[in-house]
Amino acid sequence: MILKKKPNQDLFKAGAQVFIKMFGMPVLDGKKEDFEKSLTSYFNLSEKETETILKTQRLPIKNIDASKLENYKLYKFLLSVKHYTLFGYFTSEKVGKEVLAYDPIPGQYQACISVDDTTNGRAWSL
């Protein structure tokens, strides 16, 4: 879901505009509760609705019916923001040092040892 190409960037911007329109107020005026309410309405879906949206998101934009185009753009934007937010968090220094096992200067190599014994069950940070 990398937005490197111009058409993807344009689609992201179009989705942002749909979100702004549907948010109901200037985004900068929104409070945490406003965003939580709005995002919950977009992501608190049934399993079938989620499956339908994700299936639609895999289609090229030219295959999207005009009546569903706004929703397609909206979810393209929301899923991209979700992806990059999670990517940024899980690749952050905080997670690398506090959630994952981190050893900036590893000691001697020990093969075939239990992860539980060495890292208290945490995965290694890269």
Image: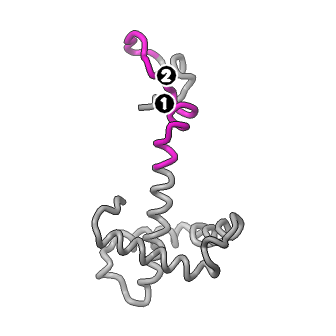
Tag 2: amino acid: Val
Query: In this view of the protein, which residue sits in the foreground, 51 or 123?
Result: 123
Q: Tell me: 58 left or right of 39.
A: left
Query: In this view of the protein, which residue sits in the foreground, 69 or 112?
Result: 69
Residue furthest out toward the front:
28
Q: Which mark is residue 123?
A: 1
Estimate how packed mark 2 is, as few (under 14), some (14 to 19) or many (20 or more) residues with alpha carbons within 10 Å.
few
Determine whether 81 is above or below 57 in the image.
above
- Number of marks in picture: 2
Q: Quadrant of the N terminus?
A: bottom left
Tag 1: amino acid: Ala
Q: Which residue is disc 2 drawn over?
A: 115
The residue range painted magenta reads 88-113
Q: Residue at x 61, y 77 (%)?
A: 26
| Distance between mark 1 and mark 2 Cα atoms | 8 Å
Q: Main secondary structure of the magenta part?
A: loop
| Residues at discs 1 and 2 in contact (Cβ within 8 Å) | yes
Q: SS for tag 1? A: loop
Q: Position of residue 94 (x, y in %)?
A: 55, 37
Q: Position of residue 76 (x, y in %)?
A: 43, 70
Residue 10 found in image quarter: bottom left
Q: Residue at x 50, y 68 (%)?
A: 50
